């Protein structure tokens, strides 16, 4: 399974999921899933060492396109990664809160 639903992400977050936001910094600051770590798509290759290999990674972007591409690339490198279908737009449209600003918050 390379994609998860918003409900699956919400459940996983309750269990401490590692969420990676692959959008650009200005998008992240405007509103992101609480606890999400910013690693822009353009920096993934250079920041592979920052990503844990011992747990599932939940990749999210605005609508699900960029995160699906990054998920595929990470899975090819042995990461347990999934893309969040619908992205941050779906997260907010289903009533989930976002955090604004540069800090990731749990």
Image (cartoon, rainbow, N blue to C red):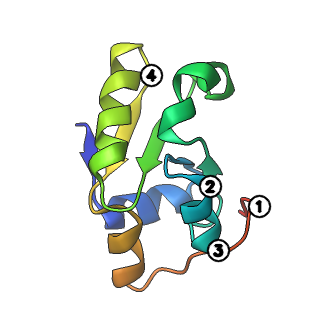
CB-based contact (under 8 Å), mark 3 and mark 4: no
Tell which tag, 1 or 2, sits nearer the viewer: 2
Q: Is residue 58 above or below residue 56?
A: below
Find the distance from the CA under tag 3 to the CA under tag 4. 26 Å
Q: Secondary structure at mark 2?
A: helix
Q: Nearer the viewer, mark 1 or mark 4?
A: 1
Residue at image x 42%, y 55%? 61
Cβ atoms at labels 1 and 3 below 8 Å apart: yes
Position of residue 59 in the picture relative to residue 39 (left or right)? left
Tag shown at residue 99? 3
Mark earlier in primary sequence (1, 4): 4
Residue holding disc 4: 79
Residue under the point 61% across and 21% down: 46
Disc 2 + disc 3, Cβ < 8 Å: no
Marked residue nearer the N-terminal end (2 or 3): 2
Q: CA distance from mark 1 to mark 2?
A: 11 Å
Quickly name the residue at label 2. Answer: 25
Mark 1 / mark 2, whichever is N-terminal: 2
**Between residues 77 and 25, which one lies in front from this camera angle?**
25
Give coordinates of residue 7: x percent, y percent.
34, 67
Q: Is residue 75 above or below residue 67?
A: above
Mark 1 neighbour density, 10 Å: few (under 14) some (14–19) many (20 or more)? some
Front residue of 9 and 21: 21
Residue placed furthest toward the top: 77
Q: Which residue is mark 1?
A: 103
Q: Is residue 53 above or below residue 94?
A: above
Q: Residue 63 appears at what percent x and percent y?
A: 31, 61
Look at 40% across and 33% down and name the residue there.
81
């Amino acid at each position: 399974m390379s994609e998860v639903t918003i409900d699956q992400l919400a459940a996983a977050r309750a269990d401490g999921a590692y969420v990676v936001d692959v959008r650009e910094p200005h998008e992240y600051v405007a509103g992101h899933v609480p606890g999400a770590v910013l690693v822009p798509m353009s920096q993934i290759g250079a920041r592979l060492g920052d990503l844990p290999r011992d747990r599932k990674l939940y990749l999210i972007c605005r609508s699900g396109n960029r995160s699906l591409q990054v998920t595929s690339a990470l899975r090819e490198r042995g990461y347990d990664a999934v893309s969040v279908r619908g992205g941050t737009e779906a997260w907010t449209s289903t009533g989930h809160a976002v955090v604004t600003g540069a800090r990731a918050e749990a």
